[in-house]
């Protein structure tokens, strides 16, 4: 049976963020292993621009599945520019969930961050000292959505995505440093579910606030622009109509 140190049992929910929002967390999982009850744990050390903007946990330990060192996260917003930034770091990661097939997966540091400015959204991942055992190697800064399959006697039982970048329906971007999926229904399957390490989500940048003017000026200018354009269009159309009648 899985046990989590300091874990909050929660159902899995999709990441999302409104304009000007950002959030991050270190570890989150929802697994159903053969011979064990379904378990959801995390998110650990969650941060949000609405508070807490920084967070940490000392250790995450799930016997037979995962053990980590310190988890640190942050999420910030620049009120002047409207930009947001989120970051999650998980240290001393050891994944034992698929040890019989992989020989064990470990990393000194698993880090993800995202950034949203008026120019758009971006994200990146850093994997320090990553060891995939018998699965081969992945770059320390892998390309978005780099995938590695885990097979047993030629049958895929799991898939690991590094630098997973998900464009959410609300316009936000989620960056997961490591996302391990168990694929059920196959011969030799060990179960189903997901394990995510170091996740950051950024919504589109919010409206910037001009210096020494405040949000009221933006609202006022917006209303003037909205009301002025239709009047100008009507005036031009009437002028053209009158000219055409005169000719």
Image (spheres, rainbow, N blue to C red):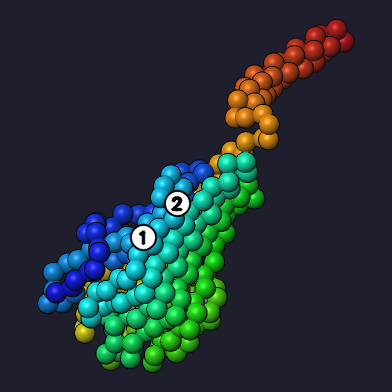
2 or 176, nearer to the observer: 2
Q: CA distance from mark 1 to mark 2?
A: 10 Å
The total of numbered circles placed on residues is 2
Q: Residue at x 22, y 59 (%)?
A: 9
Residue 137 shows in the view: yes
Q: Quadrant of residue 25?
A: bottom left
> Relative to residue 72, is residue 142 depicted above or below?
below
In this picture, residue 87 sits left or right of residue 43: right
- Label 1 sits on a secondary structure element that is loop
3 or 100, nearer to the observer: 3
> Relative to residue 181, is residue 116 depicted above or below?
above
**Residue highlighted by disc 1:** 45
| Placement of the N terminus among the 4 image quadrants | bottom left
Extreme-top residue of the structure = 246
Q: Of marks 1 and 2, which one's residue comes earlier in the chain?
A: 1
| Placement of the C terminus among the 4 image quadrants | top right
**Residue highlighted by disc 2:** 53
Q: Residue at x 51, y 70 (%)?
A: 125
């Amino acid at each position: 049976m899985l046990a989590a140190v300091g874990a909050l049992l929660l159902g899995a929910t999709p990441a999302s963020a409104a304009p000007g929002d950002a959030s991050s967390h270190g570890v989150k999982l929802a697994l159903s292993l053969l011979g064990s009850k379904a378990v959801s744990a995390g998110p650990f050390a969650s941060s949000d621009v609405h508070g807490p903007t920084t967070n940490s946990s000392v250790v995450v330990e799930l016997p037979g599945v995962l053990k980590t060192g310190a988890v640190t996260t942050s999420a910030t917003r620049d009120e002047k520019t409207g930009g947001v930034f989120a970051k999650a770091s998980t240290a001393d990661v050891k994944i034992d969930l698929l040890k019989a097939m992989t020989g064990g997966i470990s990393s000194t540091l698993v880090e993800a961050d995202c950034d949203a400015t008026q120019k758009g959204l971006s994200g990146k991942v850093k994997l320090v000292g990553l060891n995939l055992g018998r699965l081969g190697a992945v770059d320390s800064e892998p390309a978005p959505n780099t995938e590695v399959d885990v097979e047993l006697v030629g049958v895929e039982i799991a898939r690991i995505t590094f630098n997973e970048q998900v464009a959410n329906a609300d316009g936000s971007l989620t960056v997961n440093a490591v996302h391990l999926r168990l694929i059920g229904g196959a011969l030799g399957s060990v179960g189903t579910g997901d394990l995510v390490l170091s996740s950051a989500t950024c919504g589109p940048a919010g409206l910037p606030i001009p210096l020494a003017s405040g949000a009221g000026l933006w609202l006022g200018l917006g209303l003037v622009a909205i009301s002025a354009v239709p009047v100008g269009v009507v005036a031009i159309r009437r002028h053209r109509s009158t000219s055409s009648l005169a000719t």
